[in-house]
Amino acid sequence: MRTIRVLYLEQDNGTYLAHLEMNGGFKVEATSLERSDVWDGMYKASQVGRDLARRATPEQYDLVVIGNNRGTGVEYARLLLHDIKSRVLVVWNDYRPGDEEIYASLGLEHFCSRPEQADYLLKMLGEGEWHLEGYDTFDGEPYRLEGHYVNEAAATRAAQECLAKLEEDQPSESSGGRDGIQERVFIVRPDGSKYLFAG
């Protein structure tokens, strides 16, 4: 299992990093700020965060996440060494195109909303090429299912969960199951080819 080292220049939210472990198949080693380094009645850039940002190198960290936190993340971005900037993701509660201008002027390239960060980090790692596709038997149309997966095993686990949910929503007794009108789940390979997942 590949180990991913993440510098989290905001308070760690284990939910997003757990997603990397579950859906990416990684072991995650995270260095993150304490709540007191981020918030003391208002958002702030702490000395601990500044020191971590200033010393961060590609040899130490595979990824760096900066919370914008009402603009305080800009101070950390200014301290980063050039060599690590391609590995930095800046996150907002609700990112809108244009929010990133000051970070882009500092040489950063990756931006998203917090709920999207786990999938975005997988893309930054060059992983997560596997994904799932649903098929609506009524409309005869495929549709993209959320999530990116680092390998077939991770995609298979996600497909099993999708089938279990379909069985709850469209029970075999009334839908005929996978031989009837129940929707289908396909696993899509990195090359775009796919196969029906039968469970």
Image: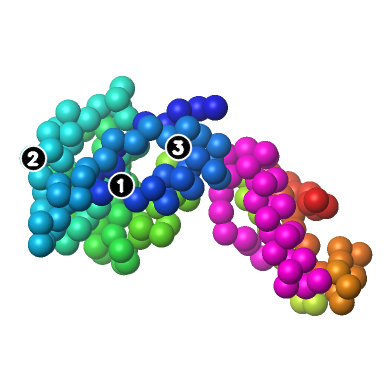
Residue indicated by mark 2? 47
* Residue 142 x, y percent position in the rendering: 72, 65
**Magenta stretch, main secondary structure class:** helix
For the residue marked with disc 3, what is the amino acid? Leu
Report if residue 128 lies within the magenta region: no
Left/right placement of residue 54 relative to residue 83 reads: left
Mark 3 vs 1, N-terminal side? 1
Q: Are marks 3 and 1 in contact (CB under 8 Å)?
A: no
The quarter of the picture where the N terminus appears is top right
* Residue 145 x, y percent position in the rendering: 62, 60
Q: Where on the picture, by quarter, is residue 139?
A: bottom right
Q: Are marks 3 and 2 in contact (CB under 8 Å)?
A: no
SS of the residue at dot 1?
loop
Q: Is 6 in front, or is 113?
A: 6
For the residue marked with disc 1, what is the amino acid? Asp
Residue indicated by mark 3? 125
3 vs 1, front mark: 1
SS of the residue at dot 3?
loop
Residue at position x 10%, y 57% in the image: 40
Cα separation, mark 3 vs mark 1, equals 19 Å
* Residue 167 x, y percent position in the rendering: 77, 66
The magenta segment: 143-171
Report the colour scheme: rainbow
Left/right placement of residue 142 relative to residue 35 reads: right
Residue indicated by mark 1? 12
Label at residue 163: none
* Residue 168 x, y percent position in the rendering: 74, 69
Cα separation, mark 1 vs mark 2, equals 17 Å
In the image, residue 188 sits, relative to residue 173, either above or below, namely above
3 vs 2, front mark: 2
For the residue marked with disc 2, what is the amino acid? Gln
Mark 3 vs 2, N-terminal side? 2
